[in-house]
Structures are given as C-alpha cells and as structure tokens.
Image (tube, helix red, strand yellow):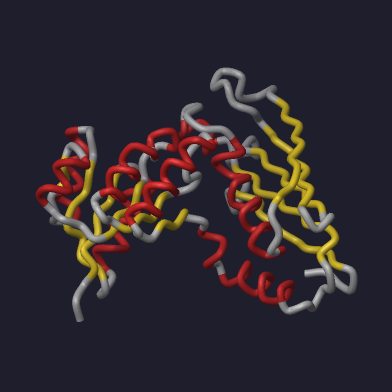
Amino acid sequence: MERLRVAVIGMGTMGLSHALVYKHLAETELVGMVETDDRRRREAEQQFGAPCFASVDELLSEAHPQAASVCLPDGLHVEPSVALAAAGVHLLVEKPLATTLEGCDAIIAAAKSANVKLMTGFTLRFDPRYWLLHESVRGGQVGQVVYMYARRNNVLASPRRLGGRVGLPFFLQVHDIDAMRWIGGVEVKRVFAFSARKVLTDLGVDDVVVSSLQFHDGSIGCVESNWILPDSLPAGRDFQLEVVGTTGKG
C-alpha cells in the first residue's frame, strides 16, 4: 500500500498532536514539519524522526508532501494554506479556517483553483456522541428542528495558557456553531451575541459569550461559552448539545 506523504505546519500543541497521529498511522508517512522557533524545530525532529523546516517553501522543495495539516495560530492560516494549495497539496486546516471572511475566501479559492481537497478540523463531526445525534435528527426522530442549545465551558487555566491570543468565539463556540449547521442541515441567517469581561481583563478577552443564532428554516440556536470555571473542576470542562424538535428531543 502506498502511504500518503503528509506534513505538519506549526509545532505547537495541535501540531504535535497531528504529527503524533500521522507518525503512527499505517496509511501516512510524516515527511516533514515546519516551525520557525529553533528550539521547537530541533525537538520536533528528535521526537518524530522527520525533518523540520523553517519555512513552507523549504518544505515544498525538500519534502514534497501530498497533504498537510496547518496548525498555526488562528491568524496565520492564510498565507501557508494558499501556498500549499498552489503547490497541489491537500489541506487539513485547524479551526477556525481563518479569522476574517477575506482570509477564508482566499483559502477556499486557492483550493478550488488547484483542485485540492480542503477540510477544517471540526472534530465534533467525528465524535460518536455527536454523530449519533446527527443521525437521529437527520433521520427525523425529533421531527423538524425548532431549537438547539450548546454549552462549551472551560476552566480558567485554558485562557491563561493561551495568553490572550484568541477569544471564545474562535476557540470554543466555533465547534458548536459548526455542529448545529451540520446536525440541522441549515445555514445560519443571523447572529446576535452578548459578552462580559470581569475576570480576564488583564488578557483583553471576554470571560463569557452567549450567541443567539437564527437559521434559514426559522429554527434558532443558543451557544453559551465561558472559560472561567475553577481549575479544581474534576472534568476540566463542561460541554453539552441538545436539539428540540416538533416531535421529540435529542
């Protein structure tokens, strides 16, 4: 069996996770990584036994990957994704795809132009619990969707670790907004949100965001997220998604 030649761009927490999976999958060969930090680059090479380059250009000229995971900070996805797509490399881009609509459009256009596959890392679509809910709702077991509610809350250590580099909508809410679109099969028409900031004022990010969504079929959704739960919380998180329909609840 010919193994897929894959690369990972960015060797932070998520990049290390992607590289570890690729290293152990029988179907993939980790042929290269990209990291601008010298220490991380050396550590990645030692851990995975594959070359770690300082730029995407070096990776493309030396390693010739067929597919790549883009695991850089949220605001840095566009340039490497466009370059990889232009080189014919299939893309798995960590969520969010980009932090602006223009950035998202640029990545999508590059992938379409090069006829390469493009996927955003929305992991809930592969979680068995969410898949069962998706199948139940799409199979008509709750009737027509009327209302969806999601809660995705983290402990205080999470924003402290991130140091203000990203806010709640991109870090947490994006998961459940995508899950609602996927489960309900309808796109969002309008969004309205409230936020509050009393704890994480030093980081310049909101403590809590509550978003109300109206979908094109008239159904509505509510997504609640905070990351100021006490670090002593045993599970370290508090997640939930439920769907209310005309004939039942899932």
Q: Quadrant of residue 209?
A: top right
Residue at 64% x, 28% y: name it: 206
Please determine whether, in this image, residue 144 is positioned above or below residue 217. below
Residue at the outermost right position: 246
Residue 85 in the image: state x and y as whole percent. 31, 50
Image quadrant where one finds the C terminus: bottom right
Residue 96 in the image: state x and y as whole percent. 50, 44
Please give the count of numbered marks on the rendered protein. 0
Of 85 and 203, nearer the camera is: 85
Residue at the outermost left position: 62
Image quadrant where one finds the N terminus: bottom left
Residue at the outermost bottom position: 1
Residue 106 in the image: state x and y as whole percent. 43, 41
Whether residue 156 sits left or right of residue 211 in the image: it is: left
Residue at 54% x, 37% y: name it: 101
Residue at 44% x, 57% y: name it: 119
Q: Quadrant of residue 202?
A: top right
Please determine whether, in this image, residue 99 is positioned above or below residue 107. above
Residue 177 in the image: state x and y as whole percent. 65, 51
Whether residue 95 sits left or right of residue 117 in the image: it is: right
Residue at 71% x, 74% y: name it: 138
Residue at the outermost top position: 202
